[in-house]
Image (spheres, grey):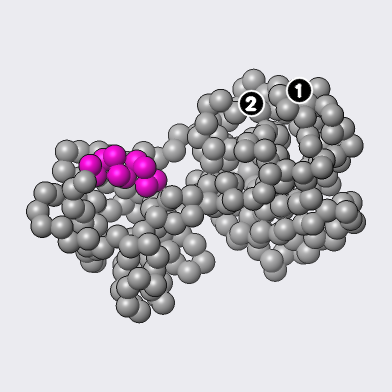
Amino acid sequence: MDSFDASKSELIHYWTDLGTESIEFTLAQARLYRNFPKFNIAFSPSRLKKGNVMAQSIIFRQFKDYFPAGTIHICNTSFVSAQSRRFIICKFLDQWFLGPDNGLFHLGFNDPDIEYYRINNNHFDKDALGEIYIPAVRLLIENPQKPLNELFDPKTVMLKPFFVQPVINEKNIRITCLYIDHEGSAYFNITKNEFDEIRNGRNVLFRMLTGTIYVIRNQAEDVDEGEIVAYFDWGNILKLTQNSGNFSKHLAIYENSQIIVEFSESKNLL
């Protein structure tokens, strides 16, 4: 296991599922600046339903590949009330990720080869940032020559929720909405690679109770205002949205809603 390279790391990224209006987010900014004055710190608040690990994983998949090498990510997202409060750390693409053992990393990375380590929580009460994450980040920074397995204990048992899988038939698939963002766009449980493999060059039609989509584009602005469009967003996740509108309210698609994607050999409509 590689050790932390202090010469590469100038950035701490703090991501939380609390909105900017919360006092906890304001205090987190102050505490991170005070504890790590030599670091640049990026803040990413995402207001989510508490413990919604599927939505957490969708957001996580969209940003995890795009930060520079050496970035330390503090993923201070919430648990559901029944879960034990355990915390883990891992390395991915020369970046360091600290977060809850609630299934987020299992769903977000979807990589069985990643080695996870347990962050000591013997003295944890309720302040994850102050009692868990800040001490663990400081331990990394103060011991740049030590590998993770000398700083933390291996995590041998992890919470591994199942990602909702598409239902695949010969001529169609049924996909499920996992997350609705603040603009009303819907994210579904399929990536571009998975979609292209199932599609196998065929034409595609998205069929919903209140509308049909014939078009896959690169972004929402590729269609006229008010039109519905499907495309693969950051992290190559399928996104359905309305240009200058609220797709979720317009077509009554919410989290856990399902739609049918049909494939055919007829004249290409895309």
Residue 214: image quadrant is bottom left
In the displayed structure, 198 sits above or below 68; it is: above
- The residues tagged by marks 2 and 1 sit, at their Cα atoms, a distance apart of 10 Å
Residue 196 in the magenta stretch? The answer is yes
- Residue 64 image label: none
Label annotation for residue 115: 2
Q: Are marks 2 and 1 in contact (CB under 8 Å)?
A: yes
Label 2 SS: loop
Q: Quadrant of residue 5?
A: top right
Q: Which numbered disc, 2 or 1, marks the residue that appears first in the sequence?
A: 2
Instruction: Name the residue furthest left.
Output: 266
Q: Quadrant of the N terminus?
A: top right
Residue at x 70% of width, y 68% of height:
21
Give the position of the C terminus as an image quadrant. bottom left
Q: Give the magenta range.
A: 191-200
Q: Which residue is mark 1?
A: 149
